[in-house]
Image (tube, grey):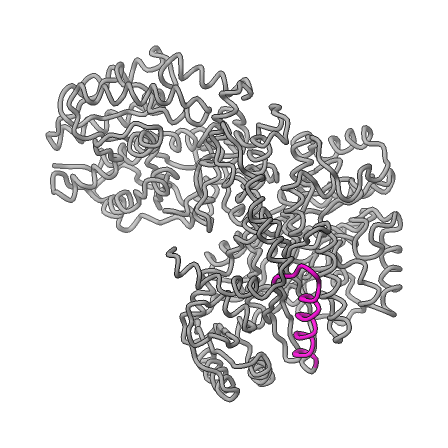
């Protein structure tokens, strides 16, 4: 806001202050000067002023916070999480597991709160600095430390043994300037996506390279567990890896990886100029450039009797990366009559429950959030849920009780509807 | 945790260990907490003075336990047990009240209703929705909208409040001139009485079957029952919405135009009149409104009805020399109406501020406005006091005042109480009622006798009869901090 506009907006206040007597003016000035005592603190990675502003808000985003909507516990409400972070940073709250837990188990880092915030805060972003400080002070709960150590030891979520199948599949991506950066969750749990990418690459004669044993985790999980130093190490390694291969473009099926590579690396001091795309964006460009055609539902036997079909927007993809149009346009091409948009879609999507470290520290709560999300599709009579995130896919697969839904990653789905 | 506790250091004395065991038995481990961090989270509501306390390391009060019931039967068992051991029970929705209604000033058991949050049924033929009271207001409205309906209850707190809170505090929303206040919306309800009986009233459009016990519970602020479910009237989504705004030279002219409109049985969903200062604050970019009183209207419903309402509204605005300002100010209000950033910005600067709403009949409306503003400004330390008219009836209005000031050498709470009391005193002297839709809570309890006069002893007898051990939300409405 420009200075003139700010003055105009506050003219009522300026007039009131000018009219007030000297003692009031003096007290106002004193209060203004003293305000910093509530948030000035050296040697901290947290933005304490923003945490303070957030904790003083009447929780105006709480209705869309998946954690408090699932747990119903005020300790998980956005303003209370900010308050816990603030009190921990200001030394007013003992750093016990019980006091720290709500800010870890109670935030899926989905940024739904940001959509409703007049300060443009995402509570998860504000808590990152608090968690980093707790990590450096060695005060984080044991299960969080175990998780960060897992990343440190494996340079990813899983050990190599767990990734055998995907590694073999990925080794066929042997040359090119486009790098496919597979997410840990995909490598460990859903190799179908890798096969699907291979199919699309073959049809379009696109050369893609991927080095599963040389690429390391993107670093996002390390940030969530406060281990920023490790995240920096992973970023440095990955960027060197891309540079050594002369990579011109990166594609990711995992929104968390895509966001970390595209924006997160800059935030931790590793700027680069390699364009990063989510696979839905890349495939949409292939369709637009007429390199591939998509069949529509009538021409495919896949998903027969599993309509209507809907799309779950992954939080990171829709809100943080603003990738919304590509998946919807692709789905509407394939399912002109069968596609139904969910009430909570696009930037107003709801988390799958497995964001942040919630599933690591409180899997019951993560699963409840996941079930809540599935119920939102069930209420609309949806039979097939498509998503563009391996973690969302994993969460839904895990909580798809009685196999009520078909759950499929958008890349895998498209690979079944694609022709040259 | 080492926080200074404002209201009660010890709370009421009862056997905590036995109570803990009993609560685990009734609600199960997943639905009971006595963790320090949860106790901190439930130690307050959104009374604005508590924001200063938060910054100063103080908390309002500490509950002993928090429970999350999943059905009325569990609450019934709790109430029976609480009567045996004499533990306070405090109903809790989202803690968004602004007068201290949910603060557990004598400790006790907080009953968080949020696990009872289903829309049980929507009945298109009857135009009703049966909803559990732990449901968030915005989520009620979103789900009803998806099904093609609206409740029409849109308070500023809608993002952060629950149906139970609306009923318990007799709330009113921004669109209430058309859709009514919460008491107009309730057809029937289910509630648990202080001694554990579960009552369920019958859904009927109207009855003539003696006094309505369920209606007594509306506005009882958790002191007479724990309301668990309500059947509410709903409406099909409006076909058309019309946005109108006029600027008036004086607040009297603005009030007169609105009065003329309502006496002709025209009910715009939204009517809001801002005094000159609040107009400058809320509509700084509307040049025609400079030094005037901005008035906005939203008419909505069937096209033909809306067109007619708009025509009549404009006629009476122009009759009182209103200057049309177009749709922009209304759109501006629609965009900014949930913006409450002052709650974050003012407290760190030691600025004490709050809002106070009262109601008054038309014949005393202007007098009350001037009297209250003058009284609030008179308190040493006040920087500004302004107001708007937020709710309208053919017989009168609800005023919504805002004040801010710096206490200087006196304690925050002294200044805060002084302005509150000045406002309420001026309201009583002007013939107004001391609360329009925020309720009584802690802030207004000591004014109840003055407000109700000859009725007050009856109200106390009702409480004594229904809740002889003063279990439900003690310290509110009837006898302040006395135990």
Question: Residue A375: x and y, percent?
Answer: 48, 42
Quadrant showing the N terminus of chain B: top right
Please say whether residue B219 is visible from this viewpoint. Answer: no
Q: Is residue A41 magenta?
A: no
Tell how many labels.
0
Q: Is residue B376 magenta?
A: yes
Q: Nearer the viewer, residue A253 or B375?
A: B375
Q: Which residues are magenta?
A: B364-383
Residue in the image at 75% along x and 60% along y:
B214
- Indicate whether A340 appears above or below B306: above
| Near-viewer residue (B441 or B370) | B370
Query: In the image, what residue occupies the spot 24% across and 35% down?
Result: A277
Find residue B478 and report its horizontal and vertical position in percent: 83, 57
x, y percent for residue A190 = 33, 24
Quadrant of residue B104 within the rendered picture: top right
**At which x and y percent is residue B282?**
49, 65
Image point (41%, 25%), residue name: A221
């Amino acid at each position: 806001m420009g200075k003139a506009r700010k003055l105009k907006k506050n003219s009522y206040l300026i007039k009131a202050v000018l009219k007030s007597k000297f003692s009031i003016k003096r007290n106002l000035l004193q209060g203004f000067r003293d305000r910093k005592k509530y948030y000035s603190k050296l040697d901290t990675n947290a933005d304490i002023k923003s945490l303070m502003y957030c904790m003083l808000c009447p929780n105006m985003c709480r209705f869309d916070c998946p954690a408090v909507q699932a747990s119903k516990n005020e300790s998980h409400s956005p303003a209370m999480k900010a308050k816990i972070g603030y009190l921990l940073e200001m030394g007013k709250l003992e750093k016990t597991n019980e006091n720290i837990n709500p800010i870890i188990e109670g935030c899926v880092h989905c940024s739904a709160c940001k959509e409703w915030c007049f300060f443009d805060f995402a509570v998860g972003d504000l808590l990152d600095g608090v968690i980093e400080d707790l990590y450096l002070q060695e005060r984080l709960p044991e299960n969080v430390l175990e998780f960060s150590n897992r990343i440190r030891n494996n340079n990813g979520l899983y050990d190599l043994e767990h990734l055998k199948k995907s590694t073999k599949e990925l080794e066929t991506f042997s040359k090119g300037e486009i790098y496919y950066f597979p997410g840990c969750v995909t490598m460990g749990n859903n190799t179908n996506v890798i096969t699907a990418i291979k199919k699309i690459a073959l049809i379009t004669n696109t050369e893609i390279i991927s080095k599963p044993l040389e690429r390391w985790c993107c670093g996002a999980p390390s940030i969530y567990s406060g281990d920023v130093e490790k995240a920096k190490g992973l970023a440095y390694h990955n960027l060197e890896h891309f540079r050594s291969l002369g990579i011109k473009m990166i594609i990711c099926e995992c929104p968390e990886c895509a966001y970390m590579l595209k924006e997160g690396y800059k935030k931790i001091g590793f700027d680069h100029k390699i364009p990063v795309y989510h696979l839905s964006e890349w495939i949409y460009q292939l369709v637009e450039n007429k390199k591939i055609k998509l069949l529509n539902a009538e021409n495919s036997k896949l998903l027969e009797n599993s309509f209507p079909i809907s799309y779950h927007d992954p939080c990171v993809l829709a809100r943080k990366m603003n990738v919304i149009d590509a998946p919807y346009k692709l789905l509407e091409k394939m399912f002109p009559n069968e596609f139904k948009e969910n009430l909570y879609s696009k930037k107003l999507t709801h988390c799958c429950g497995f964001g942040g470290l919630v599933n690591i520290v409180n899997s019951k709560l993560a699963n409840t959030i996941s079930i809540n999300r599935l119920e939102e599709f069930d209420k609309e009579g949806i039979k097939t849920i498509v998503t563009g995130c391996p973690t969302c896919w994993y969460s839904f697969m895990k909580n798809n009780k009685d196999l009520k839904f078909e759950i499929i990653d958008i890349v895998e789905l498209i690979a079944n509807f694609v022709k040259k | 945790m080492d926080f200074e506790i404002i209201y009660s250091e010890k709370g009421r004395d009862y056997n905590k260990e036995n109570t803990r065991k009993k609560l685990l038995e009734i609600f199960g481990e997943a639905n009971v907490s006595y963790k320090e961090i949860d106790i901190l989270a439930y130690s307050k509501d959104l009374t604005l003075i508590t924001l200063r306390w938060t910054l100063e390391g103080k908390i309002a009060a500490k509950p002993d336990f928090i429970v999350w019931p999943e059905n009325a039967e569990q609450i019934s068992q709790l109430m029976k047990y609480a009567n045996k051991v004499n533990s306070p029970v405090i109903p809790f929705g989202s803690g968004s009240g602004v007068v201290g209604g949910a603060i557990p000033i004598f400790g006790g058991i907080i009953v968080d209703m949020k696990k009872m949050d289903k829309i049980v049924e929507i009945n298109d033929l009857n135009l009703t929705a049966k909803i559990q009271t732990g449901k968030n207001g915005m989520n009620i409205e979103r789900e009803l909208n998806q099904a093609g309906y609206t409740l029409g209850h849109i308070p500023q707190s809608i993002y952060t409040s629950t149906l139970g809170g609306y009923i318990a505090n007799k709330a009113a929303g921004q669109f209430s001139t058309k859709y009514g206040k919460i008491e107009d919306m309730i057809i029937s309800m289910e509630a648990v009485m202080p001694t554990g009986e579960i009552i369920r009233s019958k859904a009927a459009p109207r009855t003539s079957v003696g006094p309505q016990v369920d209606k007594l519970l509306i506005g009882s602020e958790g002191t007479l029952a724990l309301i668990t479910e309500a059947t509410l009237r709903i409406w099909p989504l409006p076909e058309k919405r019309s946005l109108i705004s006029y600027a008036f030279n004086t607040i009297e002219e603005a009030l007169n135009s609105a009065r003329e409109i309502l006496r002709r049985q025209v009910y715009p969903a939204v009517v809001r009149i801002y005094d000159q200062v609040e107009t400058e604050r809320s509509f700084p970019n509307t040049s025609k409104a400079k030094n005037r009183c901005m008035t906005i209207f939203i008419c909505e419903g069937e096209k033909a009805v809306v067109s007619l309402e708009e025509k009549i509204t404009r006629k009476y605005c122009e009759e009182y020399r209103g200057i049309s300002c177009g749709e922009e100010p209304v759109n501006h209000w629609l965009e900014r109406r949930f913006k409450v950033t002052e709650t974050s910005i003012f407290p760190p600067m030691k600025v004490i501020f709050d809002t106070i709403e009262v109601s008054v009949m038309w014949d005393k409306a202007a007098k009350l406005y001037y009297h209250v503003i003058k009284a609030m400004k008179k308190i040493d330390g006040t920087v500004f006091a302004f107001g708007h008219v937020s709710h309208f009836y053919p017989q009168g209005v609800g005023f919504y005042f805002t004040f801010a000031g710096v206490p200087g050498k006196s304690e925050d709470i002294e200044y805060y109480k002084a302005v509150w009391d000045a406002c309420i005193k001026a309201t009583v002297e002007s013939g107004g009622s001391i609360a329009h839709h925020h309720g009584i809570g802690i802030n207004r309890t000591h004014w109840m006798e003055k407000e109700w006069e000859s009725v007050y002893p009856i109200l106390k007898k009702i409480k004594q009869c229904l809740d002889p051990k003063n279990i439900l939300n003690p310290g509110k409405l009837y006898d302040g901090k006395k135990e």
